[in-house]
Image (spheres, rainbow, N blue to C red):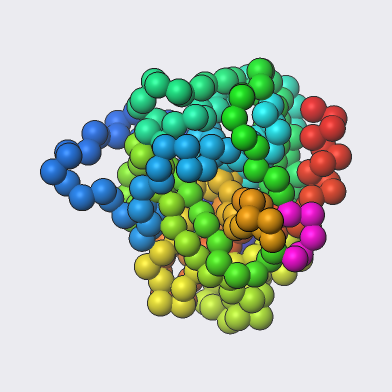
Amino acid sequence: MKNLLRTLKRCAVAAAATLAVVSLQPLSTAQAAPAPVVGGTRAAQGEFPFMVRLSMGCGGALYTQQIVLTAAHCVGATGNNTSITATAGVVDLQSTSGRVQVRSTKIYRAPGYNGNGKDWALIKLATPINLPTLPIATTTAYNSGTFTVAGWGSATEGGAQQRYMLKASVPFISDATCRTYSGYSGLVASDEICAGYAAGGVDTCQGDSGGPMFRKDNAGAWIQVGIVSWGIGCARANAPGVYSEVSTFSSAIASAAATL
Ligand code: ARG
C-alpha cells in the first residue's frame, strides 16, 4: 500500500503536465532566473544536447538518435504508441529555433515493472533526431561522485513545470545511508541509486522523472548513471532523490533497443 501511494504520488504530475507546460508564463527579464530542478540554475543552450522533454510531462535522454531512455512510470505498456511527442534541441521549450519535435512509434517498458525498482523504459521515435546521444554506464565504475541532473520539472515542491531547462549537481549517497531516511527503507539497492544532500535544498522534482542523472567519465565525456525516479517531496532534508541504477539495466536496455 505504501508503495502504491508512492507510485500514485509520483505519477500524478504526468496527467497535469501537458496543461502545465502550456500555461507556463514567460519570465520577466528583470526577474532572477528561477531555481531549477530545485536549487539549480539555467542550463545553457546546447550544454546537454541529449536532453529530451516528453509530452506527458517527463524528461528523457537520447540513447540513440531514434530511441529515448526514460522512466517506466512515465509511460504505459509496451507496444505501438504514437501519442507521445519528444521535444529536443532547445533549453527554452517555447523557442522554435533549433527545436525538434518528433512523435513516438513504440514504447518498451521494463518487463516486470510494478512501481518497485525497474523504473526504465524506451521510446522509439518516428524519425532520428540529429543531436548527440548520451552513452549509458555499463559497469558500476561511475556510480559514485558528483552527478548532474537536468530537466523542465518543478523548481519547488508542488510548483509549476518550467519553460527553461534547469540543472543542478547532487552528490552520491550510499544505499546504506539512503535506507536510513524515513520512507526509504524499501530502496531496491540493485535497481536504485540515491543522490542529494542530507540538508536538502537541491533535487530533482515532479516533471524531471525519466530524465538522466549523469557525470563525466574518465575520458571527460558525459555518461548516464541514473534515471530520475522518485523521492519523498522534493529537496527536503533527509529525503534524497532516487534514480534508477542504469548500470544494472544496461544489458537489458541494449537488448530491448535492438528490438525496437
Ligand atoms: N516521480 C517524479 C516525476 O514523475 C520525480 C520525482 C523526483 N523526486 C525527487 N525528490 N527527486 O517527475
Q: In this view, does 105 lie above or below 19?
A: above
Task: Provide the residue span drawn in magenta.
Answer: 137-141
Quarter of the figure with the N terminus: bottom right
Residue positioned most to the front: 219
Say whether residue 137 is visible: yes
Going by the picture, which residue comes out furthest to the left?
30
What residue appears at the point 46 percent right and 73 percent down from the top-left corner?
197
Along the line of sight, which residue is nearer the eye, 176 or 47?
47
Main secondary structure found in the magenta portion:
loop
Residue 241: percent from left, percent from top: 53, 63
Q: Quadrant of the C terminus?
A: top right
Q: In this view, does 208 lie to the left or right of 69?
A: left
Q: Residue 126, position in %: x, y?
A: 66, 18
**Who is closer to the viewer here, 63 or 72?**
63
Q: Nearer the viewer, residue 106 or 114?
A: 106
Asked whether residue 35 is drawn in magenta, I would say no
In percent of width and height, residue 66 lies at 69, 26
Query: In which image quadrant can residue 16 be found?
Result: top left
Residue at 40% x, 77% y is 199
Residue 14 appears in view: no
| Residue at 59 percent of width and 20 percent of height | 103
Compared to residue 73, the image places residue 77 above or below, namely above
On screen, residue 258 versus residue 159, left or right, reads right
- Locate residue 102 relative to residue 150 in the image: left or right: right
- Which quadrant of the view contains residue 128? top right
Residue 195, how many percent across, how many down? 55, 67
Q: Which residue is drawn at 79% across and 35% down?
A: 257
- All told, the count of numbered labels is 0
